[in-house]
């Protein structure tokens, strides 16, 4: 188990800066996901940690030792790649043995470790198969066993599940987490799939345009976005313009309606964006009485059935759109075209300055 | 050919295959029959027996085989790293590599040999011996060796394999010998086969530079004894085919790279 410290890492391709002074610390045995859309720099950062790219500035330290200038083959890091990376001329066992042979480890120890690693990933029965005889999921399992066999200080996973079908992805990500817990190895996992990142990580580092915009526990990332990109990228949110009325009292206005918003306390920016999760948006049929907590009015425009839950898209009278997740039985009471009251709890509102919105 | 392929092959396809087969086989068959002719109605092995007794045949044959092996070695030592590097680090240079590789098709061998002798002044131990022929032979084989390696490397995810190898602690040498070369078995076999075929039959360079290679010896024998020339030609074919068979078989073992995965 080892710690990882990334300090002020910057990377340029020509004149284009792809990483802006990235800093991130991982404690021993921690599982951290780098999450972001394509081109946000997450893979570049992982490749810098692995030694396949070199930063213009900053340093990478493992257990306090600066490895920034160390060649990739001397870093003692295990890596699983997005593309199938098994050596086609070797069996599963020979692939796992490769790193041990390079290190000239005693033959008996090699055999013991190969057996143990294949057992760990549940592929002992496939030891003598060549990569082309294995499924995609099995190949990635062997790649994981191969990376772990050298007893690396860190495990780096570069979107290892992205080439697999949905069912295998879920199985393998749970298996990766189980193995990581069993081995206790400090792990950096790169993914663009938020569900993947949120479900298996101790912490998630969200990246956007070469910057690390928020680092935190999965629940905090989901519930307490600190950056407009995080609010938009993680989960599904509806966004409405809002205005700060009184930062001390926690008062805002939405469509000229004053609202009490505890999270508005301490905000400085006058122009705000209000983010609402669909599960926090409540709808009531517009039938004369106004339910408590109702804020706005609108019309149901679209309905998407997800089984137990149905998502309704509501168009406000002012033109904006909101999403609301209701139980299917409740949603059936509000057919398309229904006029509705729209409301939400005060603590469901996430408020961020409008000028930072990407 | 498995049963399903046999079933799918229509009569017209079979007929076409037969015609093409005859086109290649008939001249060889005629050459073979002629090599056994001893005059009149007599057929026998006298041409072969005569050849076997000639030490010049063996020395020229050995020389050509040795030159073929040297050409293969030099071609692969130069081209494997060069083509690998081009694919991995300088893919923009591929058009240049492609252009250079076809130059031997454009420049006639006689011009090439004239240019080489005018420009290449190496040490006597090299320029004064048949080893000098390896230089033009490497150039002559370049279109085939380059193409074979290029196709072989394009079939591999070189970047991922290289990085996977490095992440496991391997240096460049280990990667080249244990990963790249075994996974290029078919490509290397193809390159070697084509080089053997080219060198065994190359006449212009050897003749102009006055080295007695197998092709030059066949030409000499052809001017003095037609049946022996036919026997030699057949022998030359057999050697090439055996080389082809051996190289192909060596490429089919466990070192044969197969990409993709079962699903």
Image (spheres, coloured by chain):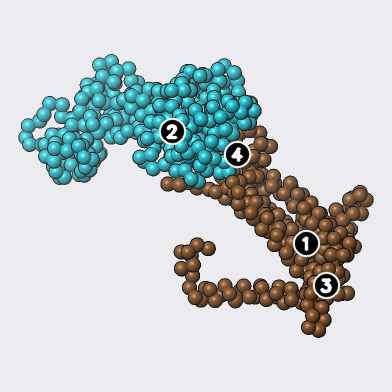
Q: Nearer the viewer, residue A357 or B10?
A: B10
Q: Which residue is mark 3?
A: B46
Chain B colour in the picture: brown
Tell me residue B43's x, y (percent): 78, 77
Q: Nearer the viewer, residue A138 or A114?
A: A114
Q: Residue at x 58, y 43 (%)?
A: A89
**Image quadrant in which you'd find residue A123:** top left
Q: Chain of mark 3?
A: B
Number of numbered labels in the structure image:
4
Left or right: where B204 falls relative to A314? right
Q: Which residue is mark 4?
A: B162
Chain in cyan, by letter, is A
Tell me residue A353's x, y (percent): 35, 27
Tell me residue B210's x, y (percent): 90, 62
Q: Secondary structure at mark 2?
A: loop
Q: Chain of mark 4?
A: B
The residues bearing labels 4 and 2 have C-alpha atoms spaced at a distance of 26 Å
Q: Secondary structure at mark 4?
A: helix
Q: Tell me: residue B127, above or below residue B165.
A: below
Q: Which residue is mark 1?
A: B200
The answer to which of marks 3 and 4 sits earlier in the sequence is 3
**Image quadrant in which you'd find residue A94:** top right
Q: Chain of mark 1?
A: B
Single out the mark in the foreground, 4 or 1: 1
Single out the mark in the foreground, 1 or 3: 3
Tell me residue A354's x, y (percent): 35, 30
Q: Which residue is mark 2?
A: A122
Q: Tell me: residue B237, above or below residue A233.
A: below
Q: Secondary structure at mark 3?
A: helix
Single out the mark in the foreground, 3 or 2: 3
């Amino acid at each position: 188990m080892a710690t990882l410290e990334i300090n002020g890492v910057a990377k340029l391709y020509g004149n284009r800066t792809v990483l802006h002074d990235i800093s991130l610390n991982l404690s021993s045995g921690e599982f951290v996901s780098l999450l972001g859309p394509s081109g946000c720099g997450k893979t570049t950062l992982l490749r810098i940690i692995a030694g396949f790219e070199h930063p213009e500035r900053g340093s990478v330290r493992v257990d306090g030792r600066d490895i920034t200038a160390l060649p990739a083959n001397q870093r003692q890091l295990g890596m699983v790649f997005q593309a199938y990376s098994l050596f086609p001329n070797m069996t599963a066992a020979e692939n796992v043995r490769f790193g041990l042979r390079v290190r000239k480890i005693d033959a008996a120890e090699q055999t013991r470790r190969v057996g143990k690693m294949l057992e760990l990933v549940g592929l002992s029965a496939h030891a003598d198969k060549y990569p082309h005889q294995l499924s995609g999921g099995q190949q990635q399992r062997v790649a994981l066993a191969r990376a772990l066999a050298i007893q690396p200080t860190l495990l780096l996973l570069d979107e290892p599940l992205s080439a697999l079908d949905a069912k295998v992805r879920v199985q393998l990500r749970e298996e990766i987490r189980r193995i990581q817990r069993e081995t206790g190895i400090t792990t950096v996992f790169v993914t663009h799939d938020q569900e993947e990142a949120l479900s298996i990580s101790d912490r998630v580092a969200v990246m956007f345009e070469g910057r690390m915009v928020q680092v935190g526990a999965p629940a905090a990332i989901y519930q307490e976005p600190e950056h407009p990109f995080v609010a938009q990228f993680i989960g599904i949110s509806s966004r409405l313009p809002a205005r700060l009325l009184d930062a001390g009292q926690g008062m805002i206005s939405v469509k000229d309606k004053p609202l009490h918003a505890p999270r508005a306390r301490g905000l400085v920016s006058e122009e705000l964006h209000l983010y609402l999760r669909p599960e926090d948006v409540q709808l009531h049929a517009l039938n004369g009485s106004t339910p408590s907590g109702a804020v706005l009015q609108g019309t149901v425009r679209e309905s998407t059935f997800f089984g137990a839950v149905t998502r309704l898209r509501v168009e406000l009278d002012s033109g904006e759109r909101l999403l609301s997740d209701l139980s299917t039985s409740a949603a059936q009471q509000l057919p398309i075209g229904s006029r509705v009251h729209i409301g939400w709890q005060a603590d469901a509102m996430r408020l961020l300055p409008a000028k930072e919105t990407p | 050919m498995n049963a399903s392929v046999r079933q799918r092959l229509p009569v017209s396809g079979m007929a076409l295959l037969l015609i093409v087969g005859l086109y290649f086989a008939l001249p060889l068959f005629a050459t073979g029959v002629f090599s056994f002719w001893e005059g009149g109605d007599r057929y026998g092995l006298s041409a072969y027996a005569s050849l076997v007794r000639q030490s010049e045949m063996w020395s020229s044959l050995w020389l050509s085989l040795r030159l073929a092996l040297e050409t293969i070695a030099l071609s692969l030592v130069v081209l494997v790293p060069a083509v690998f590097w081009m694919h991995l680090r300088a893919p923009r240079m591929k058009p240049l590599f492609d252009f250079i590789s076809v130059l031997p098709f454009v420049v006639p061998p006689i011009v090439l040999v004239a240019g080489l002798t005018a420009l290449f002044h190496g040490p006597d131990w090299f320029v004064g011996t048949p080893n000098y022929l390896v230089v033009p032979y490497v150039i002559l084989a370049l279109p085939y060796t380059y193409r074979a390696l290029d196709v072989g490397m394009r079939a591999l995810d070189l970047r991922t394999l290289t990085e996977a190898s490095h992440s496991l602690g391997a240096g460049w040498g280990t990667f080249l010998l244990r990963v790249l070369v075994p996974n290029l078995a078919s490509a290397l076999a193809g390159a070697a086969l084509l080089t053997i075929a080219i060198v065994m039959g190359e006449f212009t360079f050897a003749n102009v530079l006055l080295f007695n290679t197998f092709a030059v010896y066949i030409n000499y024998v052809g001017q003095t004894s037609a049946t022996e020339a036919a026997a030699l030609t057949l022998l030359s074919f057999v050697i090439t085919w055996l080389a082809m068979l051996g190289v192909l078989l060596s490429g089919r073992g466990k070192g044969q790279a197969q990409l993709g995965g079962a699903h």
